[in-house]
């Protein structure tokens, strides 16, 4: 495994800064850190600190993100491999947009909450959506020259929404053309290539300045004539390039003629249309970011930029736009790697910069389905997709409800998914029977027999400790644990001897073939059947069953006297129930023995009389 080329993030633990000795224990998603040396007397005490890595899974809003993206992930795994490549591409782009819509929905919820403590989560989601959208344009949609710039313009417009907010404020004022932010809005529209909206705003200014109407009309003409490539049209990219160059020469000519010299705002717009670098850099506050500067520069200087040329312009724009004294942020490095079409660097940098595995796991899975990661395998086993999915799913398993989502992620990791699921499923705390049944159903569906037995034994033992014999027997039967079923059966028989009646009759009456799991369980089921036959006055059948139980010798020795006692009412019947009933005496209570002898003598006498009588 390669070494990480960045320093790990430090987590401050109060006790460590005080020079105390610390011990630690690894957990599935966290570390417990505890003080090992402390004074036993006095007010001081030892503290246990829980250090979590993936804190986001405990956010209610982000849990919705995890739940909704899970459905998209499962749907992606069912895509048909035999679809034509064109149809596949549109399908993958649609799935990518679904992921982004889920991210944006979470962003809106965080904005509505407007809690300062959640602002960092909002900023992370905004960065995640920005990166995902760019990856969608460059990798998944893989837009060619011409279309590429149109997609990048949409990308910038989507993530520079403050222009629309400012425009609404201007338009809702009494005199929009005289608003202090009026020209900022017009220039921002031009920088984003939203020329139709810029023209509509300029009309308001032209009505206030009749003397300069011709100048505004000329600007309106230049803006309206600027060509944009139409991928669905009949015009070729070469034809568009010729048309665009002709328009660019016309704008340059207007600048050189000082056609707008008397109006500094229109002259500024004209310089932007020409693509003057110094003019663009003078409006850094309106551009906001170096990648907005990049797209604006491409729009007015290189509208037919090819994907292979993009990284040159990106590197140049970032260098020019950022202050030489400032260090690029992690987001800048990630976006630059994307513009360089270095998918693996994007994933690596995101894994380091972001505080959870959600983004890299889902993006890598989608890119893998697009067959963009086939050549990249790790040194320690599974491919990059599976490694990241396993990390993400393992984090979900530490949450009390999200663990159920993780099961599907493990299912779609063919190499190590099942092994990891077997290890993680055993760590799920079984607080209730309902949760235990959920875990059990998951294990049974995947033929995880060892885990099924383990869960059933745990639940059976817990029920036994709580003296819930019926539940304990049900779990032991489900576990197919003969020894434990024998133990519980004996507890049922002891309970019967103490109380004179059975509990959980519905379960015992419906044991069916399960009673064959152990001899003691078989005896319990048959003994209960004897009581049922006796209660229905089916004495002859009851006597046969009781006799078979005695002859089979499957009853516990401590229960023999109870069986003999149960035979007394049958022996005392006026009618001979069975002429083969015989018993061996043991050193037991004298009274019961005498009663049994008397009953046996009477029954034997009746049997002899009946056998010696010739019926007419």
Image (tube, rainbow, N blue to C red):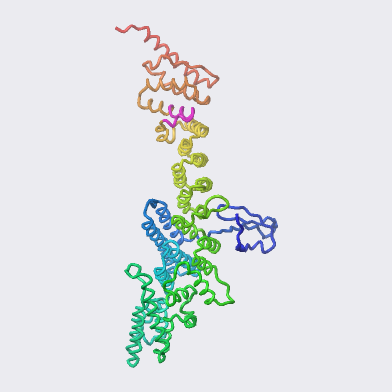
The answer to whether 190 is drawn above or below residue 590 in the figure is below
Q: Quadrant of residue 543?
A: top left
Q: Quadrant of the N terminus?
A: bottom right
At a point 46% along the width and 74% down the height, the residue shown is 292
Q: Is residue 12 above or below residue 396?
A: below
Residue segment shown in magenta: 513-526
Residue at position x 69%, y 60% from top?
A: 20
- Percent position (x, y) of residue 307? 45, 67
* Picture quadrant of residue 528: top left
Residue 283 drawn at (x, y percent): 47, 81
Q: Is residue 400 visible?
A: yes
Give whichever of 473, 136 is nearer the camera: 136
> Residue 111: x percent and y percent?
44, 69
Q: Nearer the viewer, residue 379 or 238?
A: 238
- Residue reaching furthest to the left: 616
Residue at (57% x, 55% y) in the render: 30
Prevailing SS of the magenta stretch: helix
Q: Which of the two residues, 473 or 52, is positioned nearer the viewer here?
A: 52
Q: Name the side, left or right, on which 376 lies relative to 236.
A: right
**In the rendered image, the vertical position of residue 318 relative to residue 411, given as above or below:** below
Q: Is residue 295 magenta?
A: no
Camera sees residue 394: no
Percent of width and height locating residue 84 = 37, 54
Q: Decide whether residue 524 is among the magenta residues.
A: yes
Tell me the quarter of the image containing the C terminus: top left
Total of numbered circles in the picture?
Answer: 0
Viewer-side residue, 459 vs 203: 203
Q: Residue at x 45, y 41 (%)?
A: 444
């Amino acid at each position: 495994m390669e070494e990480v080329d960045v320093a790990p993030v430090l987590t401050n633990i109060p006790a460590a800064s005080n020079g105390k000795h610390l011990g630690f224990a690894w957990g599935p998603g966290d570390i417990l850190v505890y003080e090992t040396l402390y004074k036993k007397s006095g007010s001081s005490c030892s503290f246990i600190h829980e250090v979590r890595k993936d804190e986001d899974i405990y956010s209610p809003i982000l849990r919705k993100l995890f739940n909704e993206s899970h459905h998209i992930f499962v749907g992606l795994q069912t895509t048909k491999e035999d679809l034509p490549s064109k149809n596949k591409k549109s399908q993958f782009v649609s799935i990518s947009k679904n992921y982004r819509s889920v991210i944006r929905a979470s962003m809106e919820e965080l904005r509505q909450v407007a809690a300062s403590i959640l602002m960092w989560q909002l900023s992370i989601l905004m960065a995640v959506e920005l990166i995902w959208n760019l990856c969608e344009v460059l990798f998944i949609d893989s837009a060619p020259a011409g279309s590429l710039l149109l997609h990048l313009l949409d990308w910038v417009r989507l993530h520079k929404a403050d222009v629309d907010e400012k425009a609404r404020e201007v338009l809702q004022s009494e005199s929009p053309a005289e608003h202090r932010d009026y020209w900022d809005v017009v220039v921002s529209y031009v920088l984003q290539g939203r020329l139709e909206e810029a023209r509509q705003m300029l009309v308001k200014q032209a009505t206030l300045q009749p003397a300069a109407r011709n100048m505004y009309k000329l600007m309106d003409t230049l803006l309206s004539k600027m060509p944009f490539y139409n991928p669905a049209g009949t015009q070729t990219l070469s034809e568009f390039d010729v048309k665009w160059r002709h328009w660019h020469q016309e704008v340059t000519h207007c600048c050189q003629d000082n056609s707008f010299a008397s109006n500094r705002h229109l002259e500024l717009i004209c310089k932007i249309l020409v693509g003057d670098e110094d003019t663009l850099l003078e409006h850094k506050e309106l551009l906001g970011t170096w990648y907005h500067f990049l797209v604006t520069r491409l729009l007015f200087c290189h509208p037919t930029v090819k994907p292979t040329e993009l990284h040159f312009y990106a590197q140049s724009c970032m260098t020019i736009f950022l202050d030489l004294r400032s260090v690029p942020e992690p987001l800048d490095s990630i976006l630059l790697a994307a513009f360089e079409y270095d998918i693996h660097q994007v994933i690596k940098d995101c894994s380091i910069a972001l505080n959870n595995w959600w983004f890299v796991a889902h993006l890598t899975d989608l890119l893998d389905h697009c067959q963009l990661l086939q050549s990249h395998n790790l040194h320690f086993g599974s491919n990059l997709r599976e490694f990241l999915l396993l990390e993400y799913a393992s984090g979900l398993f530490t949450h009390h409800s999200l663990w159920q989502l993780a099961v599907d992620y493990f299912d779609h990791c063919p190499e190590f998914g099942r092994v990891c699921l077997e290890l993680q499923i055993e760590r799920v705390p079984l607080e209730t029977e309902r949760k235990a049944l959920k875990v059990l159903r998951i294990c049974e569906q995947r033929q995880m027999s060892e885990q099924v037995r383990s869960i059933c034994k745990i639940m059976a033992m817990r029920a036994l400790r709580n003296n819930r014999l019926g539940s304990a027997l049900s779990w032991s039967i489900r576990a197919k644990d003969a020894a434990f079923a024998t133990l519980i059966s004996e507890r049922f028989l002891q309970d019967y001897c103490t109380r004179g009646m059975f509990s959980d009759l519905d379960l015992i009456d419906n044991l069916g073939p399960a009673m064959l799991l152990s001899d003691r369980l078989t005896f319990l089921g048959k003994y209960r059947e004897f009581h049922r036959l006796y209660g229905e006055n089916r004495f002859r059948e009851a006597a046969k069953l009781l006799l078979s139980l005695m002859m089979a010798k499957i009853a516990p020795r401590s229960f023999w006297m109870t069986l003999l006692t149960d035979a007394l009412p049958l022996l005392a019947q006026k009618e001979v129930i069975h002429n083969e009933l015989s018993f061996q005496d043991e050193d037991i209570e004298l009274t019961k023995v005498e009663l049994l002898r008397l009953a046996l003598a009477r029954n034997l006498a009746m049997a002899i009389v009946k056998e010696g009588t010739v019926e007419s």
